[in-house]
Amino acid sequence: MYTPQFSTRITNTSGNIIREVLKLAEQSHIISFAGGFPSPKSFPVEQVKQVIDELLLSSGPEILQYGSSEGYPAFREYLSTWLTERGIAATPDEVLITSGAQQVIDYMAKAFLNPGDGVIVENPTYLAALNVFKSYEAQLIPVSGDANGINLEELERAAASGKAKMVYLVPTFANPTGATTPIENRKKIVEILEKYNLIMLEDDPYSRLRYSGTPVPAVKTFDKEGHVVYTSSFSKLISPGMRVGFVTARHDILRKLVLGKQCTDVHTNNLGQRVVYEFCRRGILEPHIEKIIAQYRMQRDLMLEMCEQHMPKETTWNVPEGGLFLWLTLPAGISTTDLLPVAIEREKVAFIPGKPFYADGSGENSMRLNFSNASPEGITEGMKRLGGIIKETLKNSK
């Protein structure tokens, strides 16, 4: 029998705890706050069907054929204009259509990281990004964050150490904390990148989902020398199943990302690209976003209300102005990893423990709650159950 000899790269890659928890949470009797999913009730099924029918009737053979690695030209032209109107100057040749923003993280690692290279990440940050960087045998350099995003003094110290090659940030409605970096901090981040010759990936999947407060320009808008690569996605806006995202970068950098695309999946799904482009071109997207913003705002507000009602006074949480998550912190010494199986088995409610989001393995007393994919009834009952088990755990720990 063949004995597999796996690469160090894949051997050192851990499984995604979110996917493991979701397997348990798929059971119909479980109230799940575990995923980062948009609500299936938000999917524009009928509009997608209509657009697909029309596209296949008018351009079926073209859509079913191979496409260019860079993406559908008219879509890239549209995104170029959209980005430029928002302060991110980009020509169509500086836009690449990708299979979601997740793919861009992989391409950036492929293009820039050799084994042992350092990547500065906020502590905590997006779990799947950490796994990508680990798979390329990079060294993670965690920098603490708070309600204003990454700590600038620590960021500069990490950059000055000479150990880092790349910075990865989700500066708007961060996953998992929901934090948003203020404008002045964004400008300072760019100054640090310029001073220490670092490349940064700005991952921006949530900024269109704002429920309160004032919009903040992307970090990329302050970048005049090409230090910031900007990526976003339509997964949270239309459908994650279509796997359509995009990235913009300086032309020489983008060409390397295109090479990564050609080595991976050749091009992004033609049909998905064309559907998303038609949503944009026909003016379907913006009213749809307003609709889901109203829905998610209500669900966010309800979950915050339930926190006030059911969480013990020792627990703290954020009040996100957008995105999909609440971030809860319990008193030190309480393990949400240990709490999870009890919550699922006894109370039939699921969440994601905070520890996997920390590059240094801390955060044992934190948890991420998703409000977008839960019904109002589920939020009301699930938060009551979760608050009860947290209170019980705190009482037993004294």
Image (cartoon, helix red, strand yellow):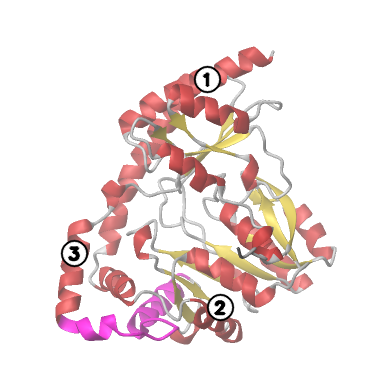
**Quarter-of-image position of residue 286:** bottom left
Between the residue at mark 1 and the residue at mark 2, the CA separation in whole angstroms equals 47 Å
Front position in the image: 153 or 353:
353
User: Which quarter of the image is occupied by the N terminus?
Assistant: bottom right
Q: Residues within 10 Å of mark 3 (few under 14, many from 20)?
A: few
Q: Which range of residues does the magenta coloring cover?
A: 58-86
Q: Earlier in the sequence, mark 1 or mark 2?
A: 2
Which residue corresponds to the image point at 27% horizontal and 71% vertical from the top-left?
Answer: 275
Q: Nearer the viewer, mark 2 or mark 3?
A: 3
Find residue 193 and report its horizontal and vertical position in percent: 71, 69
Q: Residues within 10 Å of mark 1 (few under 14, many from 20)?
A: some
Left or right of 38: which side holds 93?
A: right
**Quarter-of-image position of residue 190:** bottom right
On residue 49, which mark appears? 3
Left or right of 47: which side holds 208?
A: right
Q: Earlier in the sequence, mark 2 or mark 3?
A: 3
* Three-letter code for the amino acid on which mark 2 is drawn: Ala
* Three-letter code for the amino acid on which mark 1 is drawn: Ile
Residue linked to disc 2: 249
Between the residue at mark 1 and the residue at mark 3, the CA separation in whole angstroms equals 44 Å
Q: What secondary structure is the magenta-colored segment mainly?
A: helix
Between the residue at mark 2 and the residue at mark 3, the CA separation in whole angstroms equals 33 Å
* Three-letter code for the amino acid on which mark 3 is drawn: Lys
Left or right of 114: which side holds 383?
A: left
Find residue 265 and report its horizontal and vertical position in percent: 46, 77
On residue 389, which mark appears? 1
Give SS at disc 3. Answer: helix
